[in-house]
Image (spheres, rainbow, N blue to C red):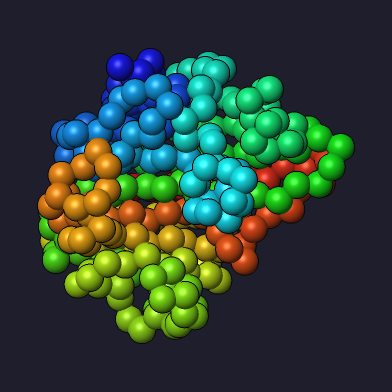
Amino acid sequence: MLDYIEVNNSSASIKIALQGAHIFHYARNGEKPILWLSEVSNFEKGKAIRGGVPICWPSFGMNNPSLPQHGFARTAEFKHLGTQEIDSNTTVVTLKLTHSKESLKLWPYKFELLFKVSISDKLTMELTTKNLDEKTFKITQALHTYFDISHISDVRVRGLDKKPYLDALTNKQLVQSGDVLFEEEVDRVYQEVKEQILLVDKNRTIHIENEGSSSVVIWNPWIEKGKRMSAMRDDAYNDFVCIESANAYEDFKMLKPGEAHTLKAVIY
C-alpha cells in the first residue's frame, strides 16, 4: 500500500497518495465520489494508480521519447509540505517534487513542481512548474481526471462545440459539432478552449473550469482497448470518462530560467 494523506472536513473528503501526488478519492459529503477509481488498481511503488487524477508531467502522452509515457511525475514520490485548515469547510494540502539524480538522468533540467489541492465543496487543483535551471525547458502536461459516471451511454460533454481538435486515433484535425457523445473509442485533444466544460450525466452535472490552459483531452478506451488496459475490469469503460485539463500539443509551455507556470482546474 502507498502512503497517502486523508482529509475530511465539513464539505468533502479526499485521499492523496504521496506517490505521484495522486488524488484517488474526492467526494462531497453525502454524495457519491466525483472521481472514478478502478477497484483492481495497483497501489504499488513505481506503478501508476488507475483512476483518480494522475499527473502527467513534464510530458503528456509520448511527446518526449526519452521519457516514460506521460512523464515521470505520476510515479515519483512527492513531499508533503503541509496541510492548512482555512475554515471548517476548506482545507489546503501542498505537495512538492523537485529534481533528483534519477530525474536528471531522464530529463536534464532542475525544477520545482508544486501541487496545491483545495478541498471544499469544489475540488481545486493547482500544478505550478518553476524552472530552477540555467536553460529554458519545454513542458506538456495534464491533470488526467477520471470522472465517475452512471453509464457511458448516459453522458455527454458540453462546451466544446465548434472547437478544433486532434483525433489521436486517426491523427486528423477536425472540428467538434455539438456535444461530445460516446459510442466508440474517443481520444481527442481539443484546442482553443476557454469556456467552462460540463459533464452532463443523467443524475448530475459536473463543472470543470481551467486556467493556464487552452487544451482539453477527452478520452474513453471503449471495448477493445479497455480489455488491453492494465489494472481495470474489461467492462470498466462503461463507468468513467476522462476529461483532462492540459497543456498538450500546440498548447505546450516554454519556461525560461526563473519562470513559472500554473495549470489550474476547478471541479464541482
Left or right of 268? Residue 115 is right
Residue visible at 47% across and 75% down in the picture = 171
The quarter of the image holding the N terminus is top left
**Quarter of the figure with residue 184:** bottom left
Left or right of 47? Residue 140 is right
Examine the rendering and report whether any part of residue 205 can be seen.
no
Number of marks in the image? 0
* Location of residue 20 in the rendering, given as x and y in whole percent from the top left corner: 46, 30
Examine the rendering and report whether any part of residue 179 can be seen.
yes
**Depicted 267 relative to depicted 9: above or below:** below
* Location of residue 203 in the rendering, given as x and y in whole percent from the top left corner: 13, 56
Left or right of 13? Residue 203 is left
* Location of residue 247 in the rendering, given as x and y in whole percent from the top left corner: 57, 56
Residue visible at 86% across and 37% down in the picture = 134
**Depicted 172 relative to depicted 2: above or below:** below
Residue visible at 43% across and 61% down in the picture = 217
Q: Which one is in front, 115 or 133?
A: 133
**Depicted 91 relative to depicted 194: above or below:** above
Residue visible at 15% across and 56% down in the picture = 238
